[in-house]
Image (cartoon, rainbow, N blue to C red):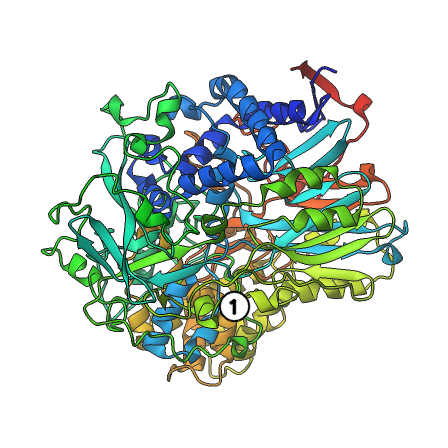
Amino acid sequence: MATEIYRDGWGIPHLRAGGVAELAHAQGLVTARDRAWQLEIERHRAQGTSASFLGASALPWDRFARRARLDDTARHCFTDLESRDPETADWLRAYVEGVNAGLGAGADAAPEFARARLAPGTWHPWTPLGVWLATHILFAGFPAKLWREQVAAHLGADAIGLFAADGPGTSGSNGWLVSGERTVTGRAVIAGDPHRWIEDPGVYQQIRLSCPEFDVVGLAVPGVPGIAHFGHTGTVAWAITNAMADYQDLYRERLRRTGAGVEALGPDGVWRRAARRTEVVEVAGEEPVEVEVIETDRGPVIIGGPEGLDGDPFGPLDPAGPSDPAALADLVGLADPAAPVGLADPPAPAAVADPAGPSDPAALADLVGLADPAAPVGLADPPALTDPAALADPAGPADVSAAAAVADPVGPSNPADASAPAALADAAGPTDPSDRVALADPTDPSDLAALADPADQSAPAALAGPANPSDLSDPSDLSDLSDLSDPAAPSDSPVAIALRYPPRVTRDLGFSALLPLLRARRVADVDRAFDRWAEPVDVVQAADTEGGVLHRVAGRVPLRAEANRLRLVPAWEPGHEWHGWQETPRAGLTDGVAVMANQRGPAAPLGVEFAPPHRHDRIAALLAGKERWSAADMPGIHTDTHLASASPLLDHLRALDALTPEAAALRDRLLAWNRRMDADSAEAALYSAVRGAVVRQLAAHPAFAALVTPPAYPEVFQPWLALVPRVGFALEHLLRAEELYGIDRPSAVRAAVEEVAARPPAGVWGDTHRLAPWRALEPKTPYDEPGLSGDHDCVLCTSGVPGLTDRAARGPAARYVWDLARREDSRWVVPLGASGVPGSPHHRDQLPRWLAGDLVPVVTDWTLLKKETDV
């Protein structure tokens, strides 16, 4: 049977082939044709080579990717997959061959390649694993542990619950399962929407994969074969939400240089050789940068080294903190510091970019004011490439990594083996004590600060991150955090922090689950497939046509000490080792319904911080309001805009008296508001303006001054460490706390109301709450992006950053409704379109539907599709 490519009216690819391998090849081919630029961005991110054509703005991510050994981990995972599951390994090869076959034509169609002076490179069999790992490495939010350390040090352990909010590495979702007993057809319906950074091209690809073994529609991750997260086989459907589990650990390391390399002190008191190599990162338009890569028995060192923090460009700010909103605006790069937040148009649409999603860390820099606030770094054209040699070899294979000359193509031996780092010879040869890569400059005061002891709590404080800032429904739910500071850390110990993450230990990214998911016929098949899932850790909901339902957690969470989950732990002390894996919890349905929205649920034993209950409670209440539901009813839930988290601020407003007439009128108007964040609502705009002013008032208080100064940690972690977003997303807790370090909250709210009353927003919520997709390169002619309904805690979760900007870089990256009665009655939509090529008729054709809350049909009749070509 010839392999065939069909398209529906929305340009969505429907693929049909005679076998599994042929189908995988076709999926890779069509993805490369539709999304070549996106695929190459993701490949370079996984390799840590994106600065070779995006310039210095991409260097922070590349340094992290090299130090965390993402590409090396992907290679190891593929090597193990070959021996453990050769069928899946061959399937990956077929997909990659299809990608390589399609990249040339895809690059010819995508204008970004010419602008970046880039030619597509060569994909390798492990590249999809690297793409998956780079996309999800920050999903568990391990940088939040850096924040917790600083909060506990400066405000005490009790403050951690007040500020409980996960950083931008995590992404939330809504998902609900309505069993047949609650539907009009008697068959289940599954619906939801993953909340991620809105990217162009989109992070999900609508696709149909059909061969004699299966016929599946779903949302694929570009660069990865199959359909992992959201799929419908005709007889069974599944969907996931982020479980908010904690499964990555940070270890303080004691390192020392010797004539032979670097050694690390273990928990048994023995110094052992650490793996060390020097890699070179090419930077377009600039000199190459050397990166020292060190790996201990715990894992790769991602922060600091034997000499401490190594010159990442963060000097201390004024420890007293900004004294006015203009200074706060300056800190985060707002275009007009004098304008009330929500009225100014920030320069960078990706001002709150997610390192787990958008690939350009310059967008992260924008958030904390590293970039020129007048220029959206990383989103404009790349630097002029006066030296073409700075580009990776456009011919292909040679551009896999600038470090190929010094990197072992196979990588080190099994990192789970305690002797592995010692087994890897120093790639640079015996280390001369004078050969120290990227050491701090002792003449630079900011570098002197960077060398401060992490256990010395007068060292630079951490700040907090913006996205999926999920906080706890009850701050007291946090476990005892009274011993977050490490008394064992000597005052002269340089900063060195290692990351331990499951696939680095197990050599398994869970790809053995992907083919069984495609072949699933019943819930039991989906259940067995997710037994092989690794990461990210998710909550799974599934239903089949025979009435079976599933609600469980899937993924690997290590068994270890409670302290590991909460904070940095000392590598040289016993008691912090991993001892196997947690059992993944299961749950049932309540009144025929299961709802997940990242709240405390079945995954509660596996996590530390979860989303507030607002989205979950609202969805559950809406579903309880009607006895029988249909697939056609679900968009009304997707688009609900009620904001329950407004209550604490409105309660403070209600208690205010002796206001100016203008402020009193504003107060009364907000108290009469219906609490819906609709794009055409003037009251929603007023509420956001008051909320932002309160956030800035609290963040500027001297009580939080120690948390204003960012640490000298690498730039990629800074979004977790910015105070204003942390205050913004923890505002409920801060306003409801019995006492808040002597801060007069009524006075702060009063000042905020008077400020907004004196200069109120002139329009409606959608005027400032506008879509802000992330792009590696901004178009030469910017799009006029639309205004949005919703807010972070609405079911329609479209997120700005309270106190900084109303622009929404994050929201529903797709919506789906899976109908188990008739698959053709299922629906889906993505924010932009099926094509990643600007100017294509299907680049942005779904945007009006997405804005309106409408979905497009899932076409299953081949006769209604247009045949594009035979492969």
Look at the picture and state if 467 lies above or below 452.
above
The residue where tag 1 is placed is 608
Look at the picture and state if 188 lies above or below 26.
below
Q: In x, y percent, where is residue 151?
A: 37, 72
> Looking at the figure, which quarter contains the C terminus?
top right
Give neighbour class at mark 1: few <14, some 14-19, many 20+ (Cα, 10 Å). many
> Looking at the figure, which quarter contains the N terminus?
top right
Look at the picture and state if 449 lies above or below 412.
below
Side of 529 where 648 appears, left or right = left
Q: Quadrant of residue 157?
A: bottom left
> Is residue 95 visible in this depiction of the protein?
yes
Q: In x, y percent, where is residue 41?
A: 44, 33
Q: Nearer the viewer, residue 783 or 383?
A: 383
Look at the picture and state if 346 lies above or below 298.
above
Q: Nearer the viewer, residue 740 or 123?
A: 123
Q: In x, y percent, where is residue 6?
A: 71, 21
Side of 673 where 395 appears, left or right = left
Q: Amino acid at mark 1?
A: Val
Side of 772 where 422 appears, left or right = left
* Residue plotted at (32% across, 35% down): 407
* Residue plotted at (53% across, 59% down): 685
> Is residue 764 visible in this depiction of the protein?
no
Query: Which secondary structure, mark 1?
Result: loop
* Residue plotted at (36% across, 39% down): 378
Q: Quadrant of residue 337?
A: bottom left
